[in-house]
Image (cartoon, rainbow, N blue to C red):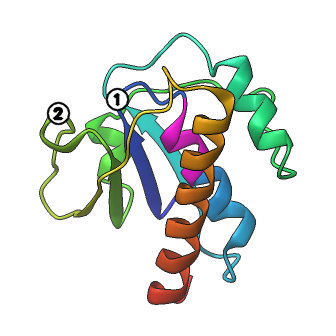
């Protein structure tokens, strides 16, 4: 399974980006990230796939999934991305909350800014935790 789960409301944008960047930049193969949402969307939007492809991250075939108790108890850390109180908390799992704007109603350039912010946060997170 995974060690880290990145969570946002719909598991369509921010959490997908964060998990993909984590798996791209991690230094430890034994550590893996997945993503999930509180109320998952039907699909990852095309603009997200497009802007991630621009940085050599392929999200084709990725589908949003619901954050379940079964998933949560298999990970050591949950990183929430902009869902704060709406994201459920699970006993025994460390939760880190990243305050991030939602990119769903932004221009492509605005979405790219959030993508870049997420990538930078993920890189710092990896360095701080030696992942």
Tag 2 residue: 86
Q: Is residue 1 visible?
A: no
**87 falls in the magenta region:** no
Residue depicted at 16% across the width and 50% down the height: 90
Q: Is residue 90 visible?
A: yes
Q: Residues within 10 Å of mark 1 (few under 14, many from 20)?
A: many
> Does 77 appear above or below 87?
below
| Quadrant of the rendered image containing residue 77 | bottom left
> Quick one: label 2 or label 1, which is nearer the N terminus?
1
**Image quadrant in which the C terminus is located:** bottom right
Q: Nearer the viewer, residue 112 or 15?
A: 112
Looking at the rendered structure, the secondary structure element under dot 2 is helix
For this view, does 69 lie left or right of residue 9? left
Q: How many marks?
A: 2
For this view, does 55 lie left or right of residue 66? right
Q: Residues within 10 Å of mark 2 (few under 14, many from 20)?
A: few
Badges 2 and 1: C-beta atoms under 8 Å apart?
Answer: yes
Tag 1 residue: 9
Looking at the rendered structure, the secondary structure element under dot 1 is loop
Prevailing SS of the magenta stretch: helix
* Magenta region: 13-18
Q: Nearer the viewer, residue 12 or 32?
A: 12
Q: Position of residue 83 (x, y in %)?
A: 26, 38
Residue depicted at 54% across the width and 10% down the height: 42
């Amino acid at each position: 399974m995974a060690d880290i789960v990145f969570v946002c409301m719909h598991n369509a944008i921010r959490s997908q980006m964060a998990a993909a960047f984590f798996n791209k930049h991690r230094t430890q193969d034994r550590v893996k990230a997945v993503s999930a949402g509180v109320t998952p969307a039907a699909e990852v939007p095309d603009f997200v796939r497009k802007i991630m492809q621009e940085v050599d991250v392929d999200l084709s075939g990725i589908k949003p999934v619901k954050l379940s108790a079964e998933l949560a108890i298999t990970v050591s850390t949950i990183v929430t991305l902009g869902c704060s109180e709406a994201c459920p908390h699970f006993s025994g799992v460390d939760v880190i909350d990243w305050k991030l704007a939602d990119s769903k109603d932004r221009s492509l350039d605005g979405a790219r800014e959030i993508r870049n912010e997420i990538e930078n946060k993920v890189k710092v997170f990896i360095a701080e935790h030696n992942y």
